[in-house]
Amino acid sequence: MRQIKVMVPDESLDEVRAVLDDESIDYVVTRSATTEERVLVEFPVPTQAVEYILEELRGTGVDDSRYTVITATETAKTANFHELEDRFVAGPEEDDSVAPEEIRGKALGMHRDNLTYYGLTLLSTIVATSGLLLDSPAVVVGAMVIAPQVGSALISGVGIVLDDRRMLAVGFRSQVLGFALAIGGAAAFGFLLKRGGFVSSLLAVSNVSQVASRVSPGLLTLAVAICAGAAGALALATALPVSLVGVMIAAALVPAAAAVGIGLAWGAPHIALGAGLLLLVNAVAVNLSAFVVLWYLGYRPPDWAAADGLSVLVQEWETVATVVVLVGLLVAASTLLAAPITFERAATGAVEDVLEGPEYAEVELVRVRADVGVGLGLSPAEGQSVTVTVNRPADTAYPRLSDRIAAAIAAETDREVAVVVEFNDRSRTAPPGGDAAAADRRPRPVVRRAV
């Protein structure tokens, strides 16, 4: 529910009152103390009716940019308010969307002062770096909870769709400086950990699962970023809570920035490049998907309706230019992603072909992860490998499996990479008087081994 206060010129008051009476809206008119030529009209309406009512008032000649206040209200008791609820909340004009003025205010309300924003960015990056090096998903998730990136991402999305230069500048500046601080903070923290002996300088960070998963961006990581931006825009535009979506947006950005810093601290360019590409792709995807969703929901620049054809491109050139740049960045980054994605699909097929052999009838494929970075298809990159995780009967050796998989991948992709096979040992026991076959279907604790 919203309380709207709008300043109305005396010459438009009769038309405004007629509109409000026709819509069965109960209102109060107060004479302005600063000027006798204007009056203050205030009235409660359901949130879903704000944009419709403001559009009707604009049709009477009211300039709502002069003085309009929209505030949240807990409850309202007026003679006709229940009729508005029947129309806009649970009736034929039901709609969860909010007015452009409100969505602008909500987005800017998520903006934090520099100390808070950059302080939380640095703290979340340190936590994410610790979680990546500890190979702990729980710690990485904790970093996402305190990360403030949701505000800057949605501010830029709203700025694009409403052609608001101030919001565009605030959103993009916060993101760029925040990512730079995150990468620098992660690199400095990693360097201190190495120099202090808390983490071995000989640690092969590319073998750490949480780091390796950020080195080779793929289609699934892009899907996460797209859905994060879309969910954030949808929550912002439909009066739904945005706080939970912030964790999802941070999941697409903060760990990638931390991985870039780790790659710099350990002198591993393939990690820094791969994670940097992931960060770029995810950041662009979040901003672009937020814009697309808001545009689909009907949000436009204020002067859009009055323009047509070529005049649209001229008047809203900043919006058009921003979208073109974002699309160009996404296409260019996606081109770099094409080779790793294609390689991973081919490698998975090669692994499946090997395991279809009769000698591997007892082996179950769990996962194939290709850690090939962005060097694939351009030049040989350090640390390129394929990790295959399988289940096997306990105490059953397959000493040649990694070699056969490596040969199959080389034959399928025409590229030689290191192959690591991780075995989960499976032990099963029949219960007393039970069916051995039934017991064989119950997995026992597994032991992880690598070849």
Image: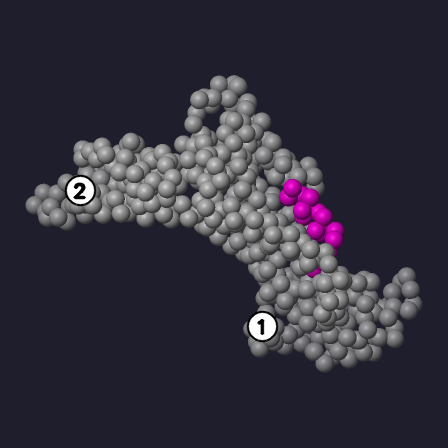
Please report the residue visible at 43 percent of the width from the left and 27 percent of the height from the top: 204
The residue singled out by tag 1 in the image is: 94
The dot on residue 359 is 2
Seen in the image, is 329 located left or right of residue 108? Answer: left
Nearest to N terminus: mark 2 or mark 1: 1
Please report the residue visible at 64 percent of the width from the left and 74 percent of the height from the top: 84
Image quadrant in which the C terminus is located: top left
Seen in the image, is 288 located left or right of residue 444? Answer: right
Is residue 282 something one can see in this rendering? no
Seen in the image, is 159 located left or right of residue 216? Answer: right
Q: Nearer the viewer, residue 380 or 39?
A: 380
Horizontal and vertical percent for residue 126?
A: 55, 32
Horizontal and vertical percent for residue 374?
A: 49, 40
Q: Residues within 10 Å of mark 1 (few under 14, many from 20)?
A: some
Q: Is residue 168 magenta?
A: yes
SS under mark 2: helix
SS under mark 1: loop
Q: Which residues are magenta?
A: 162-176
Image quadrant in which the N terminus is located: bottom right
Q: Nearer the viewer, residue 442 or 180?
A: 180
Q: Main secondary structure of the magenta part?
A: helix
Please report the residue visible at 91 percent of the width from the left and 64 percent of the height from the top: 35
